[in-house]
C-alpha cells in the first residue's frame, strides 16, 4: 500500500468498532461485543463478578472505552497501549501487524515535474465545471508533466501526463505534500494519489475562506470547492465524505458564518453522511435532485456542468434540529426554561415553612440554611433540637424551644456528622435527639437516619457525600432534612474556591432536583469577627435562605456568660425574627428557653452608664410618638448626662428589647428607615409597625 503508518490510515482501513471488538474479545464470552454492554475489566487482575468496563460511541462519532473502576477513558489506541504496556509507535505497529494492513513506517520519496501553464485541453476540462485559471491559481492547483515515486516493493516508477490523461496536483504543502488528481484515468483507483506526508484532518479550501460571511458550504470534494468558489460561494471539503467534521471546526465556522450547509454527492454515502452530520451539529443540507443522478451526475460540479439552475438549490434544502444529549448542560438549561415557563403562567403559592417557632416561620422547604457560631457555643445541640422537633412523636409534650414542624408534611431527618467519634460522642448525640423527641434509645425511627464521614479521607469526602445524597434522594419518598455538621469538613479545603463552589453547587442541584432541605453548621473565625470560616463561609452565606448565629451573650466585664443568644443574620423568605435566648440544662442535657428578665439582668451587669432602667424610663417619656434618631440621641444625652457615643451604643443594644411605654404596656424598641432618616418608636407587642403612623 502507498500509505504511511498513522492513526488516520489505520482507521481508514479498519474501523474503530472492529478494533475494539478484536482486542476486547478475550474479556467476554460474546461473539460480537455490543456498544454499551459491560464486560469484565481487562485491567483488573481477576475476572469481575460485576463487570465495570464497556465501549461506546461519543456524540462526535468517536469510539471510546470507559473504565468505571478508575474513571479512565480513551480511544482504541489508548486501549492497545494499556493492554500491551507499550508506547504509541509500538501500538501502531501491533495493529498494523495484527490486521495485515501493510502500512509503511517511512515516507516515500517523490519528484514532480510541473508545467509552466495549462494547455487548452486542460483549461477546457476545468471550464466544463465553471472553473477558470484564476480559481485554479487561488487554490494552488498545478498541472504536471509527470511525477515519480516508488511502489509497494520499493521500485521507482514514473507516470506521465497525456492529452487523454492529464495530471493535476492539489498543492497541500509546497514540496512536501501533493494530492494527485487524474480525472480522466481509465482506472478509477488511480484517479487520486497522495505524494509525501499526508496531513491529519486535511481541509481543502479552509485557507481561502473569508473571516466573516453569510454562508459556507461543506462539499464532497476538491473540484466541488473550486466550482462553488467560481460561482461566488464559500466552500470547503474534508479529505473524504466519510470523514466527520470535528466539533472544533464546526464551532469555528459557526463563529464566522451565519449558516453552514452540507452539500454532498447524491449517492448512498453522501446522503447518509450529510444527514448524520446535520443531526449531530444541527445544520442544514441540500440534497441534489434525482434528475442529476438519472443523467449520470452525482455532485455539485456535475450539476453546474449540466447547466442546471443554481437558483433552485434552496428548493432541495432541509434544516435539522440538533439532537441534544440528555446529560448535557444545554438539556438542563432548556428543561429549567420549560419549568419556568409553566410556573410563570400559574398563580404562585409559596411553600409553607417546614418548621415554625411560636407561629413564626423558621425554615422553609427546599432551601439551604446555616447555623454559625464560635467553637463550643452549642451549634450541634441547637441542630439536634431542630431535628428532634421534626421527628417528635405526636403524643410527646416536650416544648423543644417552641419549634413545631408542618404536620401536613412527612419528613425524614438525615444527620451527617464529621467531627465526633463513633464509640460514644456521636451515639450519645443521636440518643439525645431521640429521647427529647419521645423515643427510647433502642428504637430505630424510620424517619431518622444518620451517617459519619469521620473514617473517609478528607480528599474523598465530597465524592462520598455526593454519592450518599444521590442515594437517599432517589430512595426516600418523604421530604428529607439534611444536617451537615460541620460543613467545612465535607470537602478537601474550605478556603479553596473551587472546592467550596463544588459543594454549594451540589446542594443547589439537590434542592432543585429532589424534595430536600439543608441545614449547614459552620464555625466562625476565632476572635471578635462574626464571619463564618473560609471561602466556603462566604459562599454559603450568599446562597442560603436563613442564617442563624449562635453565641454566648456577654456579661459583666464583657466576659461570655452561660446565656446563649440566637440571632437571625439573614431571612430571605420572611422578615427577620427577634433574637431569643437559651441556656444549656446540665440535668436534661438539652437547650431550654429562659425569661427576658434573666437576659435583661445580664445586660445590665455590663452597663455602668445609662443603665437599662434609666434609659427605659427616658424612652417611655420621649417615645410617646415616633422620633428621628438624631433628635432622640440629643434628648437622651441631655436626660442622662452622658456622651452621644454611649447613647447610640445603648440604643443598638436595646433594639428589639421589651420596654414599657407611657401606658405601661409591653413594647418592642424598634427603628425604621423613612427617606434619609431613621425613626425610633415603641411597637406594642402584637401590633405590626405598618400600622403605626410616622
Image (cartoon, rainbow, N blue to C red):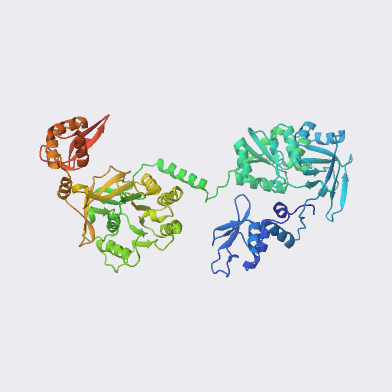
- Name the residue rendered at 87%, 35% in the picture: 121
Point out residue 37 in the picture as x, y percentages from the top left corner: 59, 62
- Which residue occupies the foreground of this view, 599 or 239? 599
**Residue 518 rendering spot, x and y as whole percentages:** 36, 52
Most extreme residue toward the front, as rendered? 557
Q: Relative to 98, say whether 508 is above or below.
A: above
Q: Quadrant of residue 175?
A: top right
Q: Is residue 336 visible?
A: yes
Count of all numbered marks drawn on residues in the image: 0
- Give the left or right position of residue 455, taking residue 410 as reference: right
Asked whether the viewer can see residue 306, the reply is no
Determine whether 483 is above or below 676 in the image.
below
Residue 521's x, y, as percent? 34, 53
In-front residue for pair 221/201: 201
Say which of 556 and 79 sits in front: 556
Residue 156 drawn at (x, y percent): 87, 51
Q: Where does the C terminus fall, quadrant-wise? A: top left
Relative horizontal placement of residue 532, taking residue 305 as reference (left or right): left
Residue under the image location 80 percent in, 41 percent down: 169
Which part of the image, by quadrant, shows the N terminus? bottom right
Instruction: Decide which of 184, 636 is in the foreground and name it.
Output: 636
Position of 515 with respect to 232 (left or right) is left
Amino acid at each position: 500500500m502507498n500509505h504511511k503508518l498513522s492513526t488516520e490510515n489505520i482507521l481508514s482501513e479498519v474501523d474503530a468498532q472492529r478494533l475494539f471488538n478484536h482486542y476486547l474479545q478475550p474479556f467476554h464470552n460474546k461473539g460480537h461485543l455490543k456498544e454499551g454492554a459491560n464486560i469484565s475489566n481487562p485491567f483488573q487482575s481477576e475476572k469481575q463478578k460485576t463487570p465495570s468496563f464497556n465501549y461506546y460511541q461519543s456524540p462526535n462519532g468517536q469510539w471510546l472505552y470507559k473504565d468505571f473502576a478508575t474513571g479512565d477513558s480513551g480511544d482504541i489506541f489508548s486501549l492497545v497501549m494499556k493492554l500491551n504496556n507499550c508506547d504509541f509507535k509500538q501500538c501502531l505497529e501491533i495493529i498494523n501487524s495484527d490486521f495485515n494492513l501493510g502500512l509503511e513506517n517511512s515516507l516515500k520519496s517523490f519528484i514532480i515535474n510541473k508545467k509552466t501553464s495549462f494547455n487548452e485541453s486542460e483549461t477546457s476540462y476545468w471550464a466544463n465545471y465553471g472553473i477558470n485559471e484564476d480559481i485554479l491559481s487561488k487554490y494552488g492547483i498545478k498541472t504536471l508533466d509527470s511525477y515519480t515515486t516508488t511502489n509497494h516493493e520499493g521500485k521507482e516508477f514514473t507516470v506521465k501526463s497525456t492529452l487523454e490523461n492529464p495530471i493535476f496536483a492539489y498543492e497541500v504543502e509546497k514540496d512536501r505534500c501533493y494530492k494527485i488528481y487524474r480525472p480522466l484515468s481509465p482506472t478509477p483507483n488511480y484517479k487520486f494519489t497522495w505524494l509525501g506526508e499526508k496531513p491529519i484532518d486535511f481541509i481543502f479550501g479552509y485557507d481561502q475562506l473569508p473571516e466573516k460571511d453569510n454562508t459556507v458550504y461543506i462539499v464532497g470534494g476538491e473540484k466541488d470547492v473550486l466550482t462553488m468558489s467560481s460561482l461566488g460561494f464559500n466552500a470547503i471539503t474534508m479529505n473524504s465524505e466519510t470523514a466527520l467534521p470535528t466539533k472544533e471546526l464546526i464551532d469555528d465556522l459557526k463563529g464566522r458564518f451565519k449558516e453552514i450547509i452540507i452539500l454532498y454527492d447524491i449517492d448512498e454515502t453522501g446522503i447518509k453522511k450529510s444527514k448524520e452530520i446535520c443531526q449531530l451539529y444541527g445544520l442544514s443540507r441540500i440534497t441534489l435532485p434525482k434528475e442529476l443522478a438519472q443523467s449520470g451526475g452525482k455532485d455539485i460540479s456535475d450539476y453546474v456542468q449540466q447547466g442546471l439552475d443554481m437558483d433552485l438549490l434552496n428548493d432541495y434544502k432541509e434544516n435539522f434540529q440538533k439532537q441534544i444529549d440528555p446529560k448535557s448542560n444545554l438539556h438542563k438549561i432548556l428543561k429549567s426554561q420549560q419549568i419556568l415557563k409553566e410556573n410563570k403562567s400559574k398563580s404562585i403559592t409559596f411553600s409553607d415553612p417546614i418548621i415554625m417557632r411560636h407561629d413564626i416561620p423558621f425554615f422553609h422547604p427546599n432551601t439551604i440554611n446555616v447555623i454559625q457560631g464560635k467553637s463550643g457555643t452549642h451549634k450541634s445541640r441547637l441542630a439536634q433540637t431542630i431535628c428532634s422537633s421534626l421527628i417528635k412523636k405526636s403524643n410527646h409534650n416536650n416544648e423543644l424551644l417552641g419549634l413545631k414542624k408542618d404536620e401536613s408534611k412527612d419528613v425524614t431527618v438525615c444527620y451527617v456528622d464529621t467531627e465526633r467519634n463513633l464509640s460514644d460522642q456521636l451515639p450519645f448525640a443521636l440518643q439525645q435527639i431521640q429521647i427529647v423527641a419521645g423515643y427510647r434509645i433502642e428504637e430505630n425511627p424510620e424517619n431518622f437516619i444518620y451517617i459519619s464521614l469521620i473514617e473517609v479521607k478528607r480528599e474523598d469526602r465530597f465524592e462520598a457525600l455526593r454519592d450518599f445524597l444521590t442515594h437517599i434522594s432517589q430512595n426516600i419518598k418523604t421530604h428529607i432534612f439534611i444536617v451537615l455538621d460541620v460543613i467545612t469538613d465535607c470537602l478537601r479545603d474550605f478556603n479553596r474556591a473551587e472546592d467550596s463552589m463544588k459543594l454549594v453547587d451540589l446542594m443547589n442541584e439537590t434542592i432543585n432536583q429532589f424534595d430536600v432541605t439543608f441545614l449547614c453548621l459552620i464555625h466562625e473565625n476565632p476572635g471578635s469577627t462574626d464571619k463564618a470560616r473560609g471561602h466556603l463561609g462566604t459562599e454559603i452565606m450568599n446562597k442560603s435562605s436563613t442564617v442563624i448565629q449562635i453565641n454566648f451573650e456577654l456579661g459583666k466585664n464583657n466576659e461570655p456568660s452561660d446565656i446563649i443568644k440566637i440571632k437571625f443574620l439573614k431571612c430571605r423568605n420572611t422578615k427577620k425574627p427577634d433574637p431569643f435566648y437559651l441556656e444549656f440544662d446540665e440535668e436534661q442535657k438539652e437547650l431550654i428557653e429562659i425569661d427576658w428578665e434573666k437576659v435583661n439582668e445580664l445586660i445590665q451587669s455590663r452597663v455602668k452608664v445609662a443603665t437599662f432602667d434609666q434609659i427605659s424610663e427616658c424612652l417611655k417619656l420621649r417615645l410617646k410618638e415616633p422620633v428621628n434618631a438624631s433628635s432622640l440621641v440629643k434628648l437622651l444625652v441631655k436626660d442622662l448626662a452622658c456622651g452621644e457615643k454611649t447613647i447610640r451604643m445603648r440604643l443598638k443594644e436595646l433594639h428589639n428589647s421589651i420596654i414599657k411605654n407611657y401606658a405601661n404596656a409591653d413594647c418592642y424598641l424598634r427603628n425604621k428607615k423613612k427617606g434619609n432618616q431613621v425613626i425610633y418608636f415603641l411597637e406594642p407587642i402584637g401590633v405590626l409597625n405598618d400600622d403605626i403612623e410616622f
